[in-house]
Image: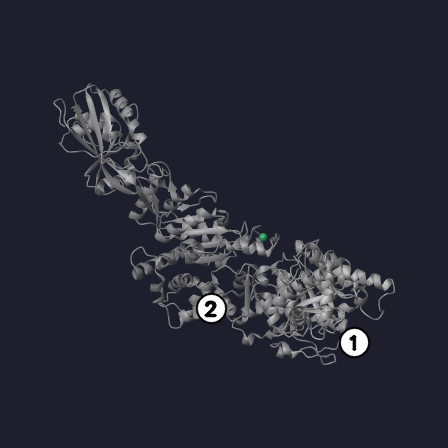
Amino acid sequence: MNGAHGCLATVHGVALVGLEPRPVRVEASMSPGLPGLRLVGLPDAAVREAGERVRTALQRRGFAWPSERLVVNLAPADLPKAGSTFDLPLAIAILVATRQLRLADGDQPWACGELGLDGTVRATVGQLPTTVGARDLGAPRLLVPDAAAPEAALVPDIEVVPVADLTEVAAVLSGERPPRAAVPAEVVDPAVGAELADVRGQAIARRAAEIAAAGGHHLLLSGPPGCGKTMLAHRLHALLPPLTFDGAQEVAALHSLAGERAPDDPLSRRPPLREPHHSVSMAGLVGGGAGVPRPGELALAHRGLLLMDELLETPRPVLDALRQPLERGEVVLNRAHARVRYPCRIQLVAATNPCPCGHLGSGGARTCTCRPDRIDRYRARLSGPLLDRLDLQLELRPVDRDALAGPPDGEPTAVVARRVAAVRELATDRWGAGTRNADVDAADVRRTCGPNVLSALADALETLGASARAFDRVLRVARTVADLDGADRIGRPHVDEALAYRLPDASVAA
Amino acid sequence: MTSVDARLAELASAVAAPGSDPGRLVAVVAWLAAPRRGPTALRRAVVAAHERGEADPDGVGLDAVLPAAGPTDRELRAAHDVLERWASLRCRVVLVDDPAYPTRLRADWPDRDAPPLLVLRGDLASDRPAVALVGARRASGYGTGVASWLAEGAAAAGVRVVSGGAVGIDAAAHRAAVEQPGGTTVVLGCGHGIGYPRGHAQPGGLFDRVVASGGAVISEQFPDQRPRAGVVRARNRLVAALTDVTVVVEGGERSGALLTAGAAAERSREVLAVPGDVRAPGSAAPHRLLAEGVFPCLGPQQLLEQVRTAVHGVVGWSVAASTSASTSASTSPSGALDDGAPTLPGISPALSTLPDDVHAHLSTVWPRPLRPDDLATATGRPAPQVLAAITRAQVSGELTVDTDGVRLRRAPAGRQDRG
Ligand SMILES: [Zn+2]
């Protein structure tokens, strides 16, 4: 391969399949023949265009385009290589192969970034997971676009070298100029969020938010418009404990891949809150797009809250698509070339109207005009496996003006958040790091019950005509209630309270 | 009656009510089953026969209409099919001149619109005082709550509750009355074979429970008559005609409940209307009646007073003691009106699983519901405590929970003098 006029140059890049990094070797060599560029192992149209971009960028920066035949190979060939992140490795490989650049340490460099036609190095999506990937694949040092350096520098144990343009790249790699040090983005702790005490006259709703936050339970809110469903969801979000650094980084990586964060945004420890509209497409929810699919709302809500308003207006197939990710904690997208996985350990807050007209149980000025059989049918759409995952179910009603105008009748967010954090720690001690009560196998929860509690629960469910599948749901909530109570064993009062968090029967006339 | 084959005779005997003549049943059904005939046609034919002086002035006039030569073979085949269907549905048929035909209806034959026959499952108990509780399918929690309250109170005192078979107010009334001594009668707006509404007609559903507990499900239609609008309207007048007092609980401006009320008024039976929320569309029908001078219905106690006034001297009956409100056999007409005020079964705070203050608040608003949040505010108890108490009381059967909130299932003991 090594021709008389040049040498084989190798530069490393990183391809992402989901969050998973795969090494890509960019090899360039000169061979006798007609002048031209031959790219091998490039199925993706975007990379094909890279040839033209790299050529123009090099020429603008005063480098020579070879008058011989240039062969460039991106290996392995079967890996889908999307995007423009291989521009920079490609340009470096060509410079080395054409002997316009002599590497100072004789090593094979790692690089990523897109080239502008003027030879500047530009940021691409996914800098954070790309950098994590490069480190995990053994790269000691990574050349990154200047603009993306703050994001890349968040990753420990790898030297991040910001480069502004091809001139600087050549100067740094040849040793003419020392590399600049990258300044990592700021890590910010969340300020106290939405104020729980603002939820007035709804002590039960506040309590449910506390339990949901403490146990990580999915929450179903039913109530007429204006009863504060979204408001409560935002308070629940504010109660969630801050993310660990690794957690925050994982969340940022997903948002970076989806192009949802700028590379110099600070790294936030606040768990994400996503609120897709009920008309969200399947691809928008689970992820999609050409080539390697991008993360959807589920993955973007990883380690945080996914608020689905008007759940019953969401098309059935989209609802069904929610189920497996909720159970597995990851989204799996099958594509021709690869199976892409994104983590989505989310807490779902689903909101719905109580009936088709929305006013059932509003009391006051609006009256429900739905026929009882219509209400039954409407509610029946909620049944099934998805409902079984929604541990806490709450009926919300509009609050009268007096209560809204009056003084707060509940505790502030900061106070409740401390209890939430304490229960999360208890759960970590009991079940293992990062495991919440909602994640635990029901069989394990059963072992923490006091005497006669299980039989009492079975009797109660039977009497109340609730589905037997509600059993585990109620137990998981009871575990959290007991934890908030400081009780080691689940007792009757805990189960009794947990049982109250289910939707009442659709109508008396059913 | 010339040639009724053995199978037809057997079917007719199975379907005919006790004391009824199976041959005559075959003749009437055969007449009705012919094309362009039906209950109304038969009634008109009888009226015409009376006007022509062909019918016995003291009789029901059927003999003047039914052909002396007996039904044709074709009519017999049709009658066979209908009787076979009724037999398979375990129905009995009461003819207008049978002893079991309700006294309240007999005066309406043939000049008003009493049906020539009634098809029934179960026990009509037509000598019991009876009250119609009617209203819309589209019912509010308030409407169904009041319907249950009135129905339970009336049936517990030995009064038969009568209503249609629809969802909403009808169903709430039947459910509350079904296990009570007075029992309940469902008047179908279709034939017995249609199974409508499906949820109530399915095996083990509301209709089966009504029959099993000593009540009745009745229809004046052939088994496969579908619930057309005209048939359902006819059903409404039958509900009124079978009862002493009609209560309109809830209904819109054009509710069928107004037809029932009109039918009751035509027969000089008492009509009461339940006052509702003036903003609710479901209050239109009762409020229109109230504006027209109908008495408001203020509770089971007052309803029972009205029933007593209506039946006094007509049918002897006694008020069932509230303590024996468990079996349907506890009401036997004693021939004398019991002067003691009927009471409603209730649960005293001492027997309640609820904390006293929670019980007290629910009693105060009863039969209206309270939202759990308001209960927490009113008692000053923390939400977890209130929720746990609600669950326990729900499991013990003391409370019901629906979208309107929580309410006591039975009248609280301290509230019996109300109304
Ligand atoms: Zn509605």
Residue type for callout 2:
Ala
Mark linked to residue A57: none
Dot 2: what SS? Answer: helix
Tell me if residue A230 comes above or below residue A94 in the rendering: below
How crowded pointer 1 is (Cα within 10 Å; few <14, some 14-19, many 20+) is rated as: few
Could you tell me which secondary element the residue under label 1 belongs to? loop
Q: CA distance from mark 1 to mark 2?
A: 49 Å
**What percent of the width, then of the height, locates residue A100?**
17, 23
**Image quadrant in which the N terminus of chain A is located:** top left
Does residue A480 appear left or right of residue B314 in this picture? Answer: left
Quadrant, the C terminus of chain A: bottom right
**x, y (%) of residue A350?**
46, 51
Is label 1 or label 2 in front?
1
Using the image as rendered, state which of residue B15 and residue A495 is in the foreground: B15
**Please, which chain is the residue tagged with disc 2 on?**
A
Residue A460: which disc? 2
> What residue is at 41 percent from the left and 71 percent from the top?
A455
- Write down the residue under mark 1: B313
Q: Is mark 2 within 8 Å of ligand 1?
A: no
| Residue lying at the far right of the rendered structure | B53
Q: Quadrant of residue A488?
A: bottom left
Left or right of residue B230, residue B353 in this image: left
Tell me where residue B183 sits by quadrant. Answer: bottom right
